[in-house]
Amino acid sequence: MSNQNHKPMTSWVQVPKNSDFTIYNLPFGVFETKRISARAGIAIGDKIVDLSVLHDEGFFSDITQLPNDIFLRNSLNDFIALGKPVTRKVRERVQELLLEEREDLREHQCRGKAMVSRKEAIMLLPVKIGDYTDFYSSMEHATNVGTMFRDPNNALLPNWKHLPVGYHGRASSIIPSGIPITRPKGQFKDPDMESPAFGPSRRLDFELELAFITGKPTKMGESISTEDAEDYIFGFVLFNDWSARDIQAWEYVPLGPFLGKNFASSISPWIVTLEALEFVRLAGPTQDPEVLPYLKCEKEHAFDINLEVYIQPEEKEATKVCTSNYKHMYWNIAQQLAHHTVNGCNINVGDMYASGTISGPTEDSYGSMLELAWKGTKPVQLAGGEERKFIEDGDTVIMKGYSEKDGIRVGFGEVSSKVLPAN
Amino acid sequence: MSNQNHKPMTSWVQVPKNSDFTIYNLPFGVFETKRISARAGIAIGDKIVDLSVLHDEGFFSDITQLPNDIFLRNSLNDFIALGKPVTRKVRERVQELLLEEREDLREHQCRGKAMVSRKEAIMLLPVKIGDYTDFYSSMEHATNVGTMFRDPNNALLPNWKHLPVGYHGRASSIIPSGIPITRPKGQFKDPDMESPAFGPSRRLDFELELAFITGKPTKMGESISTEDAEDYIFGFVLFNDWSARDIQAWEYVPLGPFLGKNFASSISPWIVTLEALEFVRLAGPTQDPEVLPYLKCEKEHAFDINLEVYIQPEEKEATKVCTSNYKHMYWNIAQQLAHHTVNGCNINVGDMYASGTISGPTEDSYGSMLELAWKGTKPVQLAGGEERKFIEDGDTVIMKGYSEKDGIRVGFGEVSSKVLPAN
């Protein structure tokens, strides 16, 4: 039943044309409604399969590793920690049950209870996030930033092509799509100021990223090879790494971003599994100079995922401002995880690893306002005659992501958050 | 019963001379033994008061907010989250029960069970750490580093005196005293190398720090004033921020420390409460230039805490290599927490906030080997004729901390960890 075979599948659940949540996808999430408490689900079309109902009704009775209440917890951590052989079986079972030709769930008395409307669901964080790391793995993004702020002729720093640069971020302020963020206040010092000022950020930005979530822990002192890395990766979400450029610029020397980033990061609530993305796996860019042995890969670890960013001013229509693709990333997930653990740093189930801003080679593929409006020098035009250098109060930023090939579509849905004025 | 009054107290528990764990201290920790599972305790002399036994026997029966199993969890988070009015009552009750003149516990049939020998206990992490932040708040340390690596005449970066510089670190690799660490491997590039090499770090270092732990959460968008900050702080531990200087030097531009730090941080297992340190509160250094209004303090937030670092080579005696004091810190805990949340970043119970390396003004008060041996140019002499530029395999690094005034002593015990060779 795996979609690698490209065996055509259709479901008895009606899946709207261009839905991200086809029978080939089946991402995991945690939801609640006005009537039912937090639980695990799988999205298909405009529905959510309530996994706790299927478990109660015995549809997983042969998967003996599943505790009775495993789908009734408020995060997927314990479920994911059961390991890929178990999570894969659950996903494949749901895929079978949803097939057009299968009647066991379609005709079951529990069907009404098992199939929840996505419109009625409130999506929660899918995992309890232990640690959160942000990489900086797009060469185009790093080059753009280096060109703007340092030297166009030496835009990339000397270490950039030798290791996937990364840093630790704040886990507590990662929130699911739909929750508004508040414009942060902080210190900034423009070049013409004698001393720093304090107030709401004047340069609020998004960063278009994807994040992977680990599903298997290591002990301190252990390292993960590039070959084994994907065994530790459960899946991906869209990640908006909100950034206050003026706060960041003043604070970040010498220890990196802090208050310019840690006020909020927004994620899409459905974890798209590695299995579902298998059909768009491809080779990443050639790496030159050659990387050190622990960063070399035998297999392909890039994925062809279309990415889009929209800005929607208050009570206006949305404008697409960025069209990018995850396949542009210079460093891949296997290299990121191998590097992260090469020093013995231990990882846990539910940890999150964002890619860094995903910019492509063309000007409309840049993954942040900083780059799209080139430091404010080329304002971005929105529908209705508005323009933006950065994000304004009342704007909603929407990111979408999907893969498409041979008539198969697998997508992330969206991460959408509105910006409220500073307190 | 509070020690602010300096009312002399003695206990029926014998407390050795120079013990850090006097009746004035009573720090909280989590321990287990070969016979009993993880639980909360309070240290006094060479004993641990098993709080679960006292609770079972009704000694806290009037503190109605305490759930039955609150002291039988494997972290203090839920207990601390009950709030200072509750945690303070528990600590003061234990203080009363331990007084020389009190017989209720001393003569109780549970005494044997309630008083556990510290020698038999394995100390665990006292809290489940959500997020971990590291500040950089010692002016002497930042000046030393700036002098060595940048410009002695402009050692401090322009932002340093305007805000308490900080960054996010890795929570997963924070371990309690006693657990050895493994020398990390990673990339480094010395100035004379054409391209980076890979191998065990050749410049492994400690950093002498104190860390505070928050005991009260905020919501996203909320900020904490300097005036309210201490309401959110439960107590302190010693913190050894292990650092691989060669890995750090190559990787840290532009996003800060990552693999040079995240392989391990070691903490002392007993949380010394703010209440216990009240008697050594004092004013910190004068801050010039004047700080922005949100960083101004009405009250004193510095503490006079003596700090020491020892290096003990394998099967040799230990040498004290550093004598510092926490009172030297330029930025205080109220300012650190106010700054951390001024942008609306939310905090949780159990989050950890380390001070940054605590260096004093004299050469013997520097809090890292980098500074003590001045980048390897002035090797540190150890007993028995050995010398050290950095930490070698087999070395144990021991940090101690204590406050003393008017015959009262309140201390942290120690954080001690041995360095094992790279895997």
Image: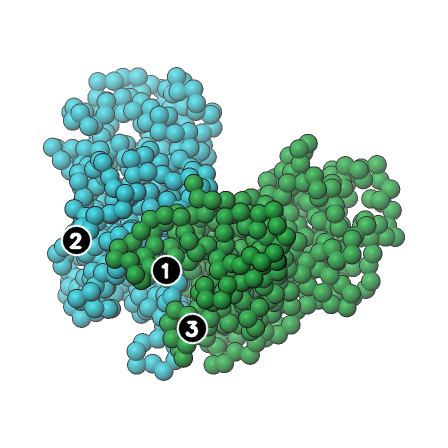
Chain colours: A green, B cyan
From this view, report whether residue A327 is shown above or below residue A74: below
Q: What is the x, y in percent for residue A117?
A: 74, 41
On the image, numbered disc 2 is attached to which residue?
Answer: B360
Element under label 2?
loop
Q: How dense is the environment of label 1, judged by Cα within 10 Å: few (below 14), some, or many (20 and up)?
A: some
Mark 2 and mark 1 residues within 8 Å of each other at the beta carbon: no
B137 sits to left or right of B351: left
- Tell me how far mark 2 sits from mark 1, CA to CA: 29 Å
Label placed on residue B294: none
Q: Residue at x 61, y 65 (%)?
A: A323
Residue A249 is labelled as 1
Q: Is residue B312 left or right of residue B59?
A: left
What mark, if any, has residue A147 been given in the picture?
3
- Please name the amino acid that badge 2 sits on: Gly
State how far apart marks 3 and 1 are (Cα): 15 Å
Q: Amino acid at mark 1?
A: Ala
Place of residue B61 in the rendered image (x, y in percent of width and height, measured from the top left): 40, 18
